[in-house]
Image (cartoon, rainbow, N blue to C red):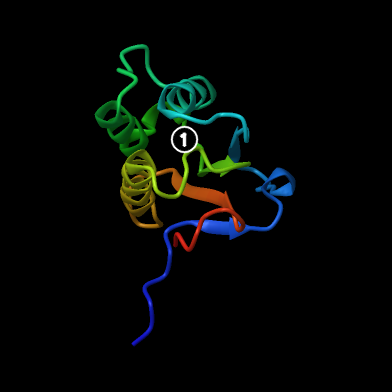
Amino acid sequence: MTAPASPFLFVDDPEAFDAEGALVVRIPAGARGKEKLLGVLARKLRFPSYFGHNWDALDDCLRDLSWQGGRGRVVIVHEGWPFSPSSPSLATYLAILADAVAAHRPGGSPPILDVVFPSRGGAGIA
């Protein structure tokens, strides 16, 4: 039996990752913790003013993305891990991202959403 494919891309050098023609949103390595992470995402993805800065609001905004103005692809590049591997917040965040990626695959709601993480430091997260 083969393992299911990860909804995320893992790269050795996320700072060098580029996706020509896409809106590339970079989450700096220093954006650690829920409050800082949500603030960076809200600002860089230009979430609507009603964004509630909580996990449910993040889930809602990432599943929608309609305000991105018809862009074909949005890529969220994490230059570091926002939580430690054992953090319950990491599990919550990854679940939200995985659901959003699934909702924005070809044939789903535009734009296509890709999420990139560094290949090191994820402690086997796929």
From this viewpoint, which residue is outermost toward the right? 16
Residue at 36% from the left image edge and 36% from the top image edge: 62
From this viewpoint, which residue is outermost toward the left? 56
Q: Position of residue 116 (x, y in %)?
A: 55, 50
Q: Position of residue 95 (x, y in %)?
A: 32, 48
Q: Position of residue 100 (x, y in %)?
A: 35, 45
Residue at 62% from the left image edge and 32% from the top image edge: 28
Q: Position of residue 3 (x, y in %)?
A: 38, 77
The answer to which quarter of the image holds residue 81 is top right
Q: Is residue 87 above or below residue 106?
A: above
Pick the quarter of the image with the N terminus: bottom left
From this viewpoint, which residue is outermost toward the bottom? 1
Residue at 30% from the left image edge and 35% from the top image edge: 59
Q: Is residue 40 above or below residue 79?
A: above
Q: Is residue 12 above or below residue 68?
A: below
Q: Secondary structure at mark 1?
A: loop
Q: Is residue 35 above or below residue 85?
A: above
Q: Which residue is mark 1?
A: 70
With 15 as the anchor, is 70 left or right in this view?
left
